[in-house]
Amino acid sequence: MAPSHPGSIIQNWILPEDMTITESAKLLGVSRQSLDALVNERRSVTPEMALKLEAVFGGTARLLLALQKRYDLYRAEQNIAEITKGLKPYKTHPSHAQTQAA
């Protein structure tokens, strides 16, 4: 199952229900467009944004960044063939011996 983008978690669990994106963005010191792009999954959570969210609304920056990393890695794995196209393993590296033996 695909991991959720952290923007949905921010919108549904961190930002107050009774507060608009504009009001939330103002409290965070960011543009409305920036926060809107994040909660609508068009932008990634940066370390700076994660710290701002933690400071203003709670939660933890580390959790938000871990969720972003998990989401990004999942998305990259969906394109692994394209990402690794033309690459060849360095056969003498110890980690390759373990995967070939398994």
Image (tube, helix red, strand yellow):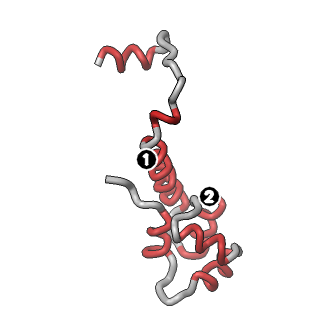
Q: CA distance from mark 1 to mark 2?
A: 17 Å
At label 1, counting other C-alpha atoms closer than 10 Å, the crowd grade (few under 14, some 14-19, many 20 or more) is some
> Residue at position x 56%, y 86% from top?
20
Q: Amino acid at mark 2?
A: Thr
Q: Point out the tag, 1 or 2, that comes first from the N-terminus.
A: 2
At label 2, counting other C-alpha atoms closer than 10 Å, the crowd grade (few under 14, some 14-19, many 20 or more) is some
> From the viewer's perspective, is residue 69 above or below residue 49?
above
> Residue at position x 53%, y 23% from top?
87
> Residue at position x 43%, y 47% from top?
74
In the rendered image, residue 60, in percent from the top left (x then y), is placed at 51, 63
> From the viewer's perspective, is residue 11 above or below residue 43?
below
User: What mark, if any, has residue 46 been given in the picture?
Assistant: 2
In the rendered image, residue 89, in percent from the top left (x then y), is placed at 49, 18
> Residue at position x 70%, y 75% from top?
31
In the rendered image, residue 58, in percent from the top left (x then y), is placed at 52, 72
> From the viewer's perspective, is residue 39 above or below residue 97?
below
Q: Nearer the viewer, residue 98 or 75?
A: 75
In the rendered image, residue 10, in percent from the top left (x then y), is placed at 49, 70
Query: For the C terminus, which image quadrant?
Result: top left
Q: Helix, strand or loop at disc 2?
A: loop
Q: Amino acid at mark 1?
A: Tyr
User: What mark, if any, has residue 74 been given in the picture?
Assistant: 1
User: What mark, if any, has residue 96 been given in the picture?
Assistant: none
Q: Is residue 14 visible?
A: yes
Q: Is residue 54 visible?
A: no
